[in-house]
Image (spheres, rainbow, N blue to C red):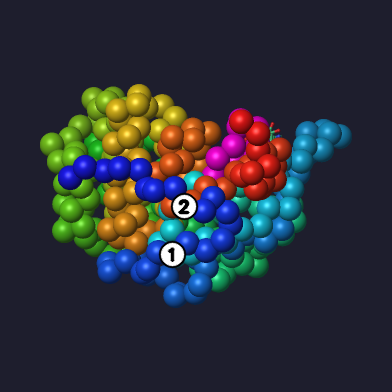
Amino acid sequence: MSFQPAPTRSANIGPANIGPANIGPAHTGLANIIEAEHLGKTYKIGKLQVPALIDVSFAVKPGEFVSIVGPSGSGKSTLFYILGGLTRATTGHVRIDGVDFAALSDGERTRMRKTKIGFVFQKFNLLPTLTALGNIEIAHEIAGAGEPLDRNRLHELTEMLGIGGRLEHRPSELSGGEQQRVAILRALVTKPAILLADEPTGNLDTKNSEAVLSMLRHSNKTFGQTVLMITHNPEAAAFADRTLLMRDGALVEPELVGP
Ligand code: ADP
């Protein structure tokens, strides 16, 4: 099967036209699975206040693949950590599947994060002493509500990602591209409704980048997972259904950005 970038659609914040996927992950069926409302984040360094996010609002529908693009320092990672419940916004609200993160206790937020969100990072973040399979099993154990690992799904994902023969290897014995595929498998095996990917191709060469992006898109279409991918690379962003642009901590309309 060959994978091509998605045709470019409206790069605006409007709704996307994606129907529900047949084997979609569990979510509550709300119109938006992610809602960011007037998000602001200010870091304090001593007496200095660093505004990293300024009044960021957008919504993502279940099953959409959205990329967030912007130069270094524009606030992408800060937004990623807030959306993933890893840090709190200074102002505004994040609703994940209708639940306001700010209204949750730390424990509830952690639980929500584990069950609803899968993370893929630039640096793969695999545990070096475990095999690829060990990394997947431990992630499932942490996220799972005591359910056994779905071996059929594991097999399906392994085939899709083309790493069938690599699961008994430790990360140091795998290429960067293979490690990122394992990290994607680890994120997908728990069937999260949302996959948050932070520069997933940042450490990969062009060939592996394309393969990883194709797989993200393929899994998005096959499993109906909502994917939010942060990148500074416009070519990577082209794999998404639509793109949000960030500049200086704010979302901007594409036509306002010069070449
Ligand atoms: P990006 O991911 O687009 O590179 P970031 O969200 O990392 O952007 O950073 C946005 C702004 O916030 C930058 O000015 C950065 O220096 C600042 N910043 C990010 N993290 C911190 C932090 N932990 N403490 C202070 N300032 C930070």
Kindly identify the amino acid type of the residue bearing the numbered disc 1.
Asn
Residue 177, above or below 68? above
The x and y percentages for residue 33 are 50, 65
Q: Residues within 10 Å of mark 1 (few under 14, many from 20)?
A: few
Q: Is residue 75 magenta?
A: yes
Residue 233, above or below 214? above
Residue 191, above or below 254? below
Q: Secondary structure at mark 2?
A: loop
The residue that appears at 35% across and 24% down in the rendered structure is 205
The x and y percentages for residue 53 are 71, 45
Dot label at residue 9: 2
Q: Is residue 144 visible?
A: no
Mark 2–mark 1 Cα distance, whole angstroms, equals 10 Å
Dot label at residue 17: 1
Residue 144 horizontal side relative to residue 91, left or right = left
Q: Is residue 39 magenta?
A: no
The residue that appears at 49% across and 57% down in the rendered structure is 113
Kindly identify the amino acid type of the residue bearing the numbered disc 2.
Arg
What range is drawn magenta here? Answer: 68-78
Name, please, the residue furthest toward the right: 47
Q: Are marks 2 and 1 in contact (CB under 8 Å)?
A: yes
Q: Secondary structure at mark 1?
A: loop
Q: Nearer the viewer, residue 14 or 216?
A: 14
Point out the image quarter for the N terminus.
top left
The mark nearer the N terminus, 2 or 1, is: 2
Q: Is residue 185 visible?
A: yes
The residue that appears at 61% across and 44% down in the rendered structure is 254
